[in-house]
């Protein structure tokens, strides 16, 4: 057993409102540069839908991830090492810019420079690739909110598969998808335990960090062979077409290192993202990723995770050099709780065999909504359990996303969420005692206390509970702060500019007036890590 | 002139190559890439690029064979001059044709595809002219100086000269007898070798053969949390 720590994420899909705030803030932070216009390290797609890039889930076409070869060993779906090298001069399955979209800007100058005339001047779209006027025909979320799904409905590979299964009438499926079922799926790089992007990089420039499991591209060693773009089944590696280097989601490692959540989590409007440490057995990864049946991959991956409450595991972790505060953080990890303790979070497409580490709590709300519309009590456990089963299409669709098609874990997760609703309603209405077992809790095999803890984590958890991130090194935290800052904030200085008095270093009002003389104005940012954290985590307005 | 071209230029080219590689590796590893434009256009590229690259690799192998394997060795395994000549004429011309077709298609693609053209730097254009000129000159030299029955035997002049470079005793006299076309080809070739590290051609030196031997998953440690020395140009201002 070799214990490694991984910073992982869980997203609660029930709460995603599809506002794209996460995508935009991520873009402003990481990819607002030329060459990366089309790159969305975080994107939010409407399900059912094609996703971004178009139809990325169709691995028959894009050949991402791993498969088992005839001897049952893991090999890249895109081909053996020799085959990859033989194809290095032109990657046969590289998505082109059209599979993403052609980036553009607008000719704003025309708005002010256009000669006086009859027509109102317009800012024409201009391609950022050619500089020529272009027609905008597609972009990262063109089919948002099922837009154009009549036209593109068949383009979702999962819909196609769900239709092919069994004898449901195609019309019924379509109606079910459009009327009762739509949800958002925010996606970032999965920072996989068995990353196929790493495995397909000929230069060895992509690596997984031992300390926190973040997968990064070494920009100095990437030589632009583009194999990783194909290798990643989630299509989360983007080729910077200006620098000729691959880039990917960094899990905001500079923030994680100082204990701050990623930008997408920090800014998420629905507060649906959870960050925490998961301990896993690195020696067990390959075996777990090679189980013969796709449907067993979910359980196999759960088996790789280690229980931080187990003293045996903790000892092994210390031995393998996992820092003590990381082990402690793993015990408080919301991700561990949602994934292993409550088992409500599920991996995205485990059948790609990369062992993804961004997990999802499947959305229950479409079920509740559908039930309420038919006149039943949408929050009654009995009704809900029944509905989950009868609404087979959504469950099958979700199973296609999260469990390689096995509906059982999806149903189990949805039932727990349903039971939680019923139990909490009973408690709130005084029908049941808080902390005591209830019918709903019993039905899903949870205790009243357990279900209430889960409720707390899912519904009311504050910043510190949602993001449990140990800093890269507690002891060194101070040194990581912006080192140009003096030991204390210069604004707090008695008589400093913050106090409405004179600036530091002027020695009081001089003979030539206040603004004269050499001032040592603080030119670096005035916020340090602690101040930022106080401001962001304080519940009290006055602390901010 | 003779000494300059055949005694000095090779060493200058070699020195430029080595210093260029070292310089590039130390100061511009970030710029060391294939700068692929496949994402803009892949249909033509998927044909042209392998054709060119495999062609040029054969050409390279042919040159190594011709220049650095002495005639006495091939004689020793029973390959006489005529057989060798036919082999080199047919094999070399085929490989050259592959390379030429490939690069012609690639240049055509570069000219006609707007995003690809826009991503072409002046450095690239210079490099393309040199590279195409060099390959064309080589083909021309070979074909005009050969027929099926006999051909110019560079293994008595150019090859010994090239080998003598390594003993630091260049036999410049050998080159004076070589046909003009061959000499132009050789000079262009040396210039090409000299500019490789300063153009995108540098990617040839990162051919990833090590991929075949390393484990699939690469782990790296973040390293100690000390402040790294900043690269040149990124020092703190300490205002
Ligand atoms: S999701 Fe991320 S870690 Fe996994 S294969 Fe893709 S790029 Fe690599
Ligand atoms: S910011 Fe949050 S709620 Fe908004 S789209 Fe992103 S994940 Fe969903």
Image: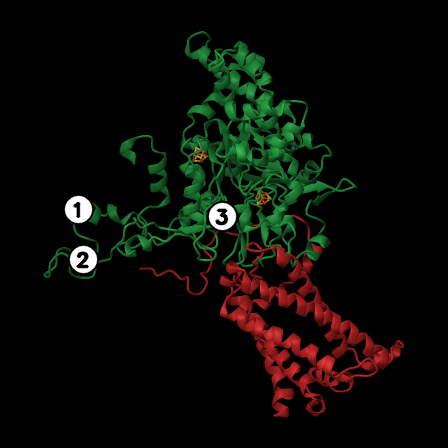
Q: Identify the mark at residue A345; answer none if there is no mark.
A: none
Rendered view: A96 above or below B89: above
The residue nearer to you, when weighing A215 against A375, is: A375
Q: What element carries label 1?
A: loop
In the rendered image, residue B4, in percent from the top left (x then y), is placed at 61, 89
**Chain seen in green:** A
Chain B colour in the picture: red
The residue nearer to you, when weighing B101 against A366, is: B101
Task: Give the spatial CA distance, label 1 vs label 2.
Answer: 14 Å
Q: In which quarter of the image is the C terminus of chain A?
A: top left
Same chain for the residues at labels 1 and 2, yes or no?
yes
Mark 1 crowdedness (10 Å alpha carbons): few <14, some 14-19, many ≥20: few
Outermost residue toward the front in this view = A118
Label whose residue precedes the other's in the sequence (3 or 2): 3
Q: Identify the mark at residue A506; answer none if there is no mark.
A: 2
Label whose residue precedes the other's in the sequence (1 or 3): 3
Mark 3 crowdedness (10 Å alpha carbons): few <14, some 14-19, many ≥20: many
Mark 3 against mark 2, which lies toward the viewer?
A: 3
Q: Identify the mark at residue A39; answer none if there is no mark.
A: 3
């Amino acid at each position: 057993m070799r214990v490694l720590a991984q910073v992982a994420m869980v997203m609660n899909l029930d709460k995603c409102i599809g506002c794209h705030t996460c995508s935009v803030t991520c873009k402003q932070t990481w990819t607002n540069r030329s060459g990366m216009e089309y790159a969305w390290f975080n994107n939010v797609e409407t399900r059912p839908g094609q996703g971004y890039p178009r139809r990325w889930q169709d691995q028959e076409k894009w050949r991402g991830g791993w498969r088992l070869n005839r001897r049952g060993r893991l090999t890249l779906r895109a081909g053996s090492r020799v085959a990859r090298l033989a194809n290095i001069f032109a990657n046969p399955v590289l998505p082109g810019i059209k599979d993403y979209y052609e980036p553009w800007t607008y000719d704003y100058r025309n708005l002010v420079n256009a000669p006086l005339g009859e027509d109102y001047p317009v800012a024409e779209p201009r391609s950022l690739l050619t500089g020529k006027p272009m027609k905008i025909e597609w972009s990262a979320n063109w089919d948002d909110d099922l837009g154009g799904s009549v036209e593109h409905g068949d383009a979702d590979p999962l819909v196609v598969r769900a239709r092919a299964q069994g004898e449901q009438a195609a019309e019924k499926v379509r109606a079910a998808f459009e009327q009762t079922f739509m949800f958002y799926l925010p996606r970032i790089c999965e920072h996989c335990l068995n990353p196929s992007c790493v495995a397909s990089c000929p230069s060895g420039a992509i690596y997984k960090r031992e300390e926190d499991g973040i997968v990064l591209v070494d920009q100095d060693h990437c030589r632009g062979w583009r194999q990783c773009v194909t290798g990643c089944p989630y299509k989360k590696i983007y080729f910077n077409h200006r620098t000729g280097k691959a880039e990917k989601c960094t899990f905001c490692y500079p923030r994680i290192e100082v204990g701050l959540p990623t930008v997408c989590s920090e800014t998420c409007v629905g507060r649906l993202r959870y960050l925490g440490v998961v301990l896993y057995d690195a020696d067990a990864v390959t075996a777990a990723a090679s189980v013969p049946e796709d449907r067993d991959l979910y359980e196999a991956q759960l088996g790789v995770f280690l229980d931080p409450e187990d003293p045996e595991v903790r000892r092994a972790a210390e031995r393998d050099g996992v820092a003590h505060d990381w082990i402690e953080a793993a015990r408080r990890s919301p991700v561990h709780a949602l994934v292993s303790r409550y088992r409500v979070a599920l991996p995205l497409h485990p059948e790609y065999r990369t062992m993804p580490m961004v997990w999802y709590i499947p959305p229950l709300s479409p079920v509740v909504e559908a039930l309420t519309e038919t006149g039943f009590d949408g929050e009654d456990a009995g009704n809900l359990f029944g509905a989950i089963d009868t609404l087979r299409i959504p469950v099958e669709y979700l199973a296609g996303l999260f469990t390689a098609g096995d509906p059982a874990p999806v149903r189990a997760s949805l039932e727990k969420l349903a039971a939680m609703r019923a139990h909490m309603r009973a408690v709130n209405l005084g029908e049941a005692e808080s902390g005591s077992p209830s019918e709903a809790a019993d039905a899903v095999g949870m205790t009243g206390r357990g279900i209430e803890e889960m409720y707390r984590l899912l519904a009311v958890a504050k910043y510190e509970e949602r993001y449990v991130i140990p800093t890269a090194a507690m002891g060194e935290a101070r040194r990581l702060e912006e080192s140009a800052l003096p030991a204390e904030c210069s604004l707090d200085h008695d008589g400093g500019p913050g106090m409405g008095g004179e600036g530091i270093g002027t020695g009081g009002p001089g003979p030539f007036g206040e603004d004269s003389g050499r001032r040592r104005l603080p030119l670096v940012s005035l916020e340090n890590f602690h101040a930022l954290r106080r401001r962001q985590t304080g519940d009290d307005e006055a602390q901010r | 002139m003779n000494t300059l071209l055949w005694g000095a230029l090779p060493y200058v080219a070699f020195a430029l190559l080595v210093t260029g590689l070292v310089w590039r590796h130390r100061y511009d590893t970030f710029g060391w890439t294939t700068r692929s434009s496949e994402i803009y256009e892949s249909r033509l590229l998927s044909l042209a690029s392998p054709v060119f690259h495999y062609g040029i690799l054969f050409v390279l192998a042919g040159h190594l064979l011709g220049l650095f394997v002495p005639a006495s060795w091939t004689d020793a395994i029973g390959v006489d001059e005529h057989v060798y000549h036919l082999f080199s004429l047919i094999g070399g011309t085929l490989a050259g044709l592959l390379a030429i077709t490939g690069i012609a298609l690639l240049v055509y693609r570069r000219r006609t595809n707007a995003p690809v053209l826009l991503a072409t730097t002046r450095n690239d254009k210079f490099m393309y002219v040199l590279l195409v000129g060099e390959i064309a000159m080589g083909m021309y030299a070979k074909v005009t100086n050969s027929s099926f029955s006999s051909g110019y035997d560079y293994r008595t002049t150019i090859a010994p000269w090239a080998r003598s470079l390594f003993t630091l005793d260049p036999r410049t006299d050998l080159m004076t007898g070589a046909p003009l076309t061959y000499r132009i080809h050789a000079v262009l070739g040396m210039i090409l070798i000299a500019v490789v590290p300063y153009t995108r051609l540098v990617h040839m030196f990162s051919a990833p053969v090590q991929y075949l031997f390393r484990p699939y998953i690469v782990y790296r440690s973040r390293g100690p949390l000390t402040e790294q020395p900043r690269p040149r140009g990124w020092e703190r201002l300490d205002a």
